[in-house]
Image: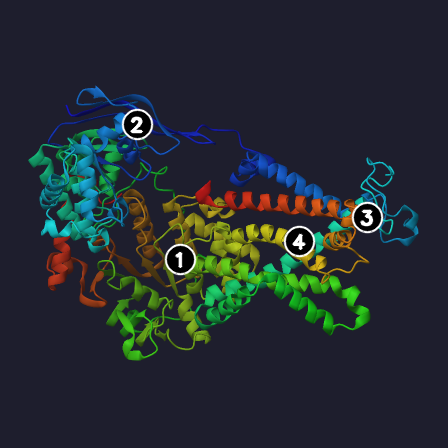
Amino acid sequence: MATTKPPLGFWGRLADNDVAHSFLTTPSAMIAAGIAVLCIGAALLAPLIAPFNPFDPSQISLWDGKLPPAWIEGGQAQYLLGTDNQGRDMLSTILYGGRLSIIVGLAAVCLGMVLGVVLGVISGYFGGTVDSIIMRAADVQLTIPGILLAILINGVGRAVLPLEMRDEFAIYVVIVAIGLTDWPQFARVVRGATMVEVSKEYVQAARVIDLPGWMIMVRHILPNVMRPVLVLATIGLALAVIAEATLSFLGQGIPPTTPSLGTLIRVGNEFLFSGLWWITFFPAIALVVLVFSVNLLGDWMRDALNPKLR
Amino acid sequence: MLLDIKGLDVAFLTRRETVKAARNVSLQVEAGEVLGLVGESGAGKSTIGNAIMDLLEKPGEVTAGEILFKGKNIRGLSEDEMRRIRGDEIGMIFQDPQTSLNPLLTIGQQLVETIQKSLGLRDKAAADRAVELLEGVGITEARARLQAYPHQFSGGMRQRVVIALALAGDPDLIIADEPTTALDVSIQAQILDLIKGLCRSRNLGVIIVTHDIGVIANIADRVAVMYRGEVVETGPVAQVLGAPTHAYTKSLIAAVPRADKRLKRFAAIDYIEGGDAPRRRIDVQNHWLGAAQDFRPPKGIAVDVKNISLSFVLQKAILKRNRKMLKAVNDVSFQIREGETFGLVGESGSGKSTIARCIARLYNVDQGSIQAMGRDLLADPRAPETRKARRALQMVFQDPYSSLNGRMRVGEIVAEPIRFFKLTADEAETQRIIGDLLDHVGLGASAAKRYPHEFSGGQRQRISIARALASRPRILICDEPTSALDVSIQAQILNLLKDLQDELGLTMLFISHDLPVIRQMCDRIAVMKDGAICEIGENEQLFTAPQHPYTRHLLDLMPRMDLLEPSAVMPAEG
């Protein structure tokens, strides 16, 4: 017989939840979550915690350019991670750059997710010709490497914009480029999950009530297919950050005037062989730590939300 | 004494609690005797079988007691010693022959391997022995069949092979865990005869674990009744089933639908799930639920199905003549009178559920017409007249787990049809009616705030019924509403459906493969085979004087319940 326990409060019930319990007993998930929260928090709060504002010309002095990190001879205490060729504090640029990378990544994943989930649910719900058209489009897109497609969309986007608006709108173009390459992953997973749900009797019950298709999709199917989407979105965030960095590294993404992590790595790359390793090294480490922790989190989430692996 | 279990305790230690699956269980099996272990889901009957074989799944554990096999305690033996006992001394037959055979190996390979492992015979001798075994379980042309793969056998044949495998090591005891549950009725009888015959001819001890009293009545010599981990009653079958002494056994037997006569209600089932939940009766005359409908059926015919046919495409092809079609429903016509319960009965694949889904407009028929309440259901679905007719028709589904959206609260689930059809004046009235409906199906208004996973299968089926009633239907389609439920829960749900029908004057289309259930529920019955109706008749006439040979065949297959003396069954009025 069940041993009776006193009723739990709100937080107690939250911690008693299976997913929360799995989180609290998986050290790698907790560490990854800690690092990810730290990275994302630091990046988003960059204007408040960064020692300098790298975009403010009054705070930049070319005299302080190319200084090494503070603990190396010639370094200055105020520039903890050194400065780049223009005299900008590396720590501040990384924080600001990370902020841009994460914003681009989040926005791109959201775009890809919304597009993919909508198309996936429609595809799985209606089936037949609608399904064929959407899924073949996804298949075709998946035959082209994502980064090439992003470069193509990015290139077209820039060509369409007038010259003086290019830098200003570069960030949105990058978001659209990455988001548009992302949707087939979401669409495939959601379509499969939708097809499973459609065959269940609660959907048939809704049809007997005569609910219109869009109501069944929004009220009944959508909440039941969101679990795998959550996992995919987490891993997708890491991939989108990498995609942004790659685009920027190739000079296709964010312009150097408002650098992202990728742009920083590219700029630093030019000075790597002059011995100024810190300009490229620290942004790269920041990128790796961010992506790694988000990925670990995604891995844990995939296991924790899968009832078969519990 | 072949097997003597003394004071066995089995516990499952989970994160939240320790579940005692078996408590102080004592059982004896003699050689040449069939012991039936009967109980409902969660009673711990399979746990006992697995505990004997040391096959308990984590985190299950035997915490006390002894298992004496031929006088020797086998509890706590090492894995190696246990492996020798499994197969050589104790054989096991599982429920599903699909999964207990390896699909990648031939029958011969699987048998020979087992024989060699336990008897140490050479290839030739082992093959001979395999043929002998297969012939022993009634498989003809056994030598040729050694080369066959499991998928080349039918379900019943596969179960015979599984039995042969269990016998391969020449065991003294066989544990059969629901050996016939996955099989059709006609095959069930053959397999039970086979097991009983083997028990007698080889002087084996057999434990049959089952939820089905009919199986017990047909095969067992002695029976042990389990309830919530405890054996509540043991004794010879005739005594336990004919004159049960424990209150649970009485309830269980009273809940078994009888095929020989129709009762008004199942006797009060007061021993399960806190008893028949107290339903609040509602003064239907003055209640929302009984509010007058805006139409009456013409000439008392609620549903009129005329010559409907429906084919499914089995194999797609561009050319019509290359397509393979399955005629799921073939020129079916019947009428359901207002206020009656019309039964559709047939074996799996006979098309009975397809007809229900055609009437509920989940499938579109190829030909024919369907009218409900005098309105054409197949007309323009957007027309207000068709809408009304469809609203008057609701459905209760088979699987209590997939028929409710797990992400919605029970109150939201029940409110959905009310809100969609705008049947109430305001939100306060909606909430009041949800409470009334949940009260009415015996769950209590407080259920509205909870999620479906907090409820058991029977309670979920009550929620389904409340949802179906929420659009104030006149016709209720019940598609195997109780076939996923335990027999005592089934009795409660069937009672509830009967009461609702009496109070609300519902017309019901009741679909089941289970003849005794149909016998208890329906006024008129149609027997289906291969998508067509063989015979339509009144309940009494169909069961006492069937006209069609197929109906007679089905009636012959029903498990005989002669052992259940009328005196053992509680009075019909409860």
Name the amino acid, label 1. Answer: Glu
* Dot in front, 4 or 3: 4
Cα distance in 3D space between marks 4 and 3: 20 Å
Chain bearing tag 4 is A
Name the amino acid, label 3. Answer: Pro
The residue lying at 55 percent from left, 63 percent from top is A118
Which residue is tagged 1?
A: A201
Residue A145, percent across and down?
Answer: 58, 62
Category of crowding for the residue at label 2, using alpha-carbon neighbours closer than 10 angstroms: few (below 14), some (14–19), many (at least 20): few
Q: Label 1: state its secondary structure.
A: helix
Asked if residue B438 is positioned above or below residue B348 in the image, the reply reads: above
The residue lying at 49 percent from left, 47 percent from top is B451
Q: Nearer the viewer, residue A236 or B533?
A: A236
* Dot in front, 1 or 4: 4
Tell me the number on the disc at residue B79: 2
Category of crowding for the residue at label 4, using alpha-carbon neighbours closer than 10 angstroms: few (below 14), some (14–19), many (at least 20): many
Which residue is tagged 4?
A: A241
